[in-house]
Structures are given as C-alpha cells and as structure tokens.
Amino acid sequence: AASLENLGGPFEIILVDDGSADGTRHVLKDLSEQYPQVHTSTFVRRKGRGSALNHGISLSRGKYVITMDADLSYDVDHITQILSTFANQPQTDLVIVSAYMKGGVIKGVPLSRLFVSRVANKILSGSFPGNLSTVTCVVRGYRGSTIREIPFFENDKEMHLEVLRKIAVCHGRICEIPGRLIWKEKKRRASGKSRSMFIGSSIRHLLYGLLSNPTRIFKYMVVGSILFGLFSMVIIAQAIVQNIPMESVGLSADWETI
C-alpha cells in the first residue's frame, strides 16, 4: 500500500485467500482494517489459483488490473513498470513480466525447477503470437475493460494460458517486459515440498498447449524422433565398424600395425 500511495493516484488492493489453513485469513482481516484500500476475500475451500485470480479480477474496478504472487518473488517495483508500459503504449491490453527475456533477472531458483520451467515456456510460447519468453508467470498487467469482459473457466494455473489464448483470439495487444524473479530462503526451503505439485502443473500446462496448438507439440515430437533416430544410427555404425576384422576389408596385419 505504501508503494502504491507514492504513485499519486487512486488504487485498490484485492487479496484473495484460496482456502488456506495457515492463518492467512486473520492476516488479511488485519490488513483490511489497517488500510481502507485493501479488500479481501476468502474461499471456504481450495479452488485453485485460476479461481482465485478470476474472482479477484471480477471484484476489480480500476482502469488497469495487476496480478502478483503474494510472496513477492517479483518485487512491487514491477507495478510501476507495468503502468509505465501502459502509459507509453496506450493500445496495449496485456503486459507480461518475464524474467526469461533479455534483461530479466533470476536469483535463488533451484536449477532443476528453473530448467523445467524454461523448457516448458519455450515449448508453450509457440502456441501464442508475439514470440513471448514467458507464458506461465502470474505477474501481469491487464486493461481492466478487456480482462473483465472475457469469461474464464480454468480453475488452476492453466488460466495463465487461457487468458493469453482468449486475448489473442480477440486480437488484443500483448507486450512483454523484463522482470526480476528472486526467491527468498524461505521459499527455497519450501520448494521441495511442492515439487510434485510443480511437476503436475507443468504437465497440465503442456497438455493445455497440445490442445491449443497440437501441430506445435507434434513438431517437437517429430524433430525429437528424427534426432533420436540419427543418434541411434551413429551408435550402430560405430559398433559395426569397431567389430569388423581388418582382414575382411583387405588390410594386412602389417598395415594394421602401421
């Protein structure tokens, strides 16, 4: 709230608790009492990130809607950058913050998790226009009138892809700006517990991409099959050459020694 007050304009903060059982609702209640601009909503049971985002967007009233992770892995200064992008490019409907594009910063993210995420984003990016570097990040800015008019149905993280697909279908303008993804020690310690959830989410993202643009995924499968076939042929050829006696190809023992 303090960072937004420095912008000098009206704003609202909408915090959606997806049915957590760690006392988050009590923290949100205290925040709403302390800051009149903070509005909170709590689900009785978990419905997924997509449901929480969709609900928060439906409650919004501003000209622009900015969504962020509650743990601030992406710092609040991204809000100013997103708003500056809208000001400089007034026709933009969606601003995506990307730590994977040129100028982005990544710190503290486990290498295994980072590898899977980057590969998945590389594969999925071809399903959307604009040669995007990141399609799964939640940190984005939307034109309010655009995002509130589109119905969304995905309940989990696949909503990030659904939003891109539907804005693209509506010929909305999408742009990407560099971001800073910095994991704190607490999140790194907790990442091991959520590894299976992350893998499951990555698989669902890829399946969603397959349904959205099947030819893209099949292209990677075909290329992979060709490369695997060529690699196998090289291995087989090497094994054959190494096991052919020198005499069988007309070379004497003396020549072999030389």
Image: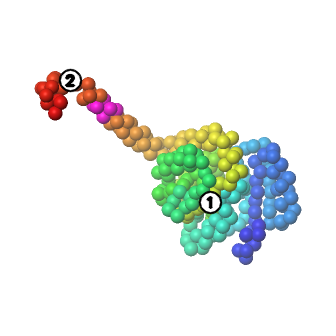
Name the residue type under label 1: Arg
Vertical placement of residue 243 versus 67, above or below: above
Residue 136 visible? The answer is yes
Asked if residue 234 lies in the magenta stretch, the reply is yes
* Residue located 26% across and 28% down the image: 242
Left or right: 39 as drawn, with respect to 108: right
Name the residue type under label 2: Pro
Vertical placement of residue 52 versus 146, above or below: above
How far is disc 2 from disc 1 in space, using C-alphas? 65 Å
Asked if residue 219 lies in the magenta stretch, the reply is no
Residue 117 visible? The answer is no
Q: Position of residue 21 (x, y in %)?
A: 81, 44
* Residue located 87% across and 62% down the image: 33
Q: Position of residue 71 (x, y in %)?
A: 71, 55
* Residue located 58% across and 62% down the image: 179
Q: Quadrant of residue 194?
A: top right
Vertical placement of residue 204 versus 102, above or below: above
Write down the residue under mark 2.
Answer: 245
Write down the residue under mark 1.
Answer: 140
* Residue located 49% across and 50% down the image: 122
Secondary structure that dominates the magenta span:
helix
SS at circle 2 = loop
Left or right: 52 as drawn, with respect to 167: right
Q: Which residues are magenta?
A: 232-238
Work out whether residue 75 or residue 238 is closer to the camera in this orientation and state it. 238
Which of the two labelled residues, at mark 2 and mark 1, occupies the earlier sequence position? 1
Mark in the foreground, 2 or 1 = 2
Left or right: 18 as drawn, with respect to 129: right
Number of other residues with Cα within 10 Å of mark 2, as a class: few under 14, some 14 to 19, many 20 or more: few
